[in-house]
Amino acid sequence: MKIKDTVKSYEEVCRLNTEKHRKPIRQSTVLRHVIKILSKVEMKATEFSCEYIGMDRLKDDEPCLILMNHSSFTDLQIIGTIFADRQYHIICTNDGFVGKENLLRHVGCIPTAKFIIDTNLVRDMKYAFEELKSSVVMYPEASYSFDGTQTPLPKSIAKCLKLMKVPVIMVMTEGSFLRDPLYNNLQKRKTKVSAKVSYLLSPEEIERSSSEELYKILREAFTYDQFRMQHEHGVIIDEPFRADGLHRVLYKCPSCGREGDMTGKGIHITCNSCAKEYTLNEDGTLSSSDNKCEFKYVSDWYAWERQQVKKELEENNYLLDIDVDIKMLVDKKSIYSVGEGRLIHTDNGFELRGCDGKLNYTQSPKASYSLYADYFWYEIGDMICIGDSKVQYYCFPKDQTKAIVAKTRLATEELYKMLL
């Protein structure tokens, strides 16, 4: 998938008119059924199956909030299949609207900026529930999972449930991540995909529960480990490219401690510094060339990297300082390439300088609990996005061979927790 990209100077982009907010519009019934038809090929290829739990409690025409874990683009096709007979709106990142805003609004999408406080989103959701009598699909994790486990949930999600006063439905997928993990450069694997659709909370249960209790319920509902489930359920993935790009997630060698010098290719991930080779096995486990594998699962390795980042922050040793290409998003007509710069991340937050000295943006570490970071973003490259409700800056490291995107997201999350 591509995105419209226009070259403009930083000054030209700053002069562009600010967009006016638009309320959601009623979802096109025709387009909803087109989505179902288009999703059939993918669903058939994955032998998709679905289990429903307690869904008889939800009336056919009753608006509800649908929460779903976020694993891959397949998630959208799952939603299009499961809820084809129910009007729904789906919360979508702003950049998804670029060049196709009218279509996406008729599909039922509601735009928002990831990990940025957006008061319009709350109003849009209430409008969809109360005026359009529509359900709303939300991926509260906001970004795809990097390692096949849950990403942090904002504590504000519990308050959101209190405001909306509608039933909450939980959709938990299994196999969606394994079929199309973000690190693997859009290469799909042959594996089954399933979903469990559960009636999680009624309006009455939400009313009598505290925000803390609701948040605990949501965190438990969003607990999963796709590689571990693969192994425990005996799922075999034997594609010869299954470790391609895995160094984006497993960027630090547990044997020698070197960072950014791993290479994921074929079925192996290798440290170019100490030459230790690891294999991503067909059952989702890891093994090593010396039979001394430090971790059984990718998720264990990633959790260790998180602890290493936390240690760096505690010891004031953490630093990201890289040259980047900069693109800006200020409207839904295009993304704008504005030049080059330098992105710095420390315990003081982010600083982005560039465009011949004209751009100097800083972002507090308290600004967000996580970071919009992505691999192979719109087939351009690995990316880190910072910004506010008016403008987002998409930063693409000049040296794409150094896998720093995952570490930067981990650092953002750990730093935020340290400052609470």
Image: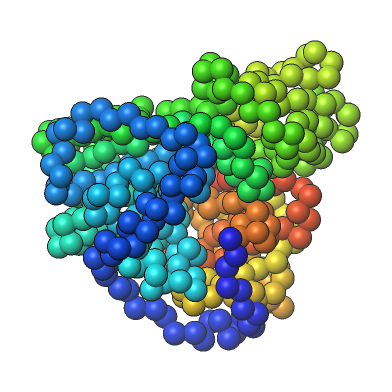
Q: Quadrant of residue 228?
A: top right
Q: Is residue 246 left or right of residue 10?
A: right
Q: Is residue 370 visible?
A: no
Residue nearer the viewer, 43 or 373: 43
Rendered view: 300 above or below 417: above
Quarter of the image for the N terminus: give it. bottom right
Q: Quadrant of residue 312?
A: top right
Residue found 57% across the figure and 22% down from its top: 235
Q: Is residue 143 left or right of residue 309?
A: left
Q: Percent x, y for residue 84? A: 30, 50
Residue found 62% across the figure and 37% down from its top: 189
Q: Is residue 201 left or right of residue 352?
A: left
Quarter of the image for the C terminus: give it. top left
Q: Percent x, y for residue 351? A: 61, 61
Residue found 57% across the figure and 37% down from its top: 179
- Residue furthest out toward the top: 291
Count of numbered circles in the view: 0
Residue found 65% across the figure and 76% down from its top: 338
Rendered view: 15 above or below 364: below
Q: Percent x, y for residue 201? A: 20, 34
Q: Percent x, y for residue 291? A: 80, 13
Residue nearer the viewer, 185 or 84: 84
Rendered view: 337 above or below 63: below
Residue nearer the viewer, 299 or 413: 299
Q: Is residue 406 left or right of residue 370?
A: right
Q: Is residue 134 visible?
A: yes
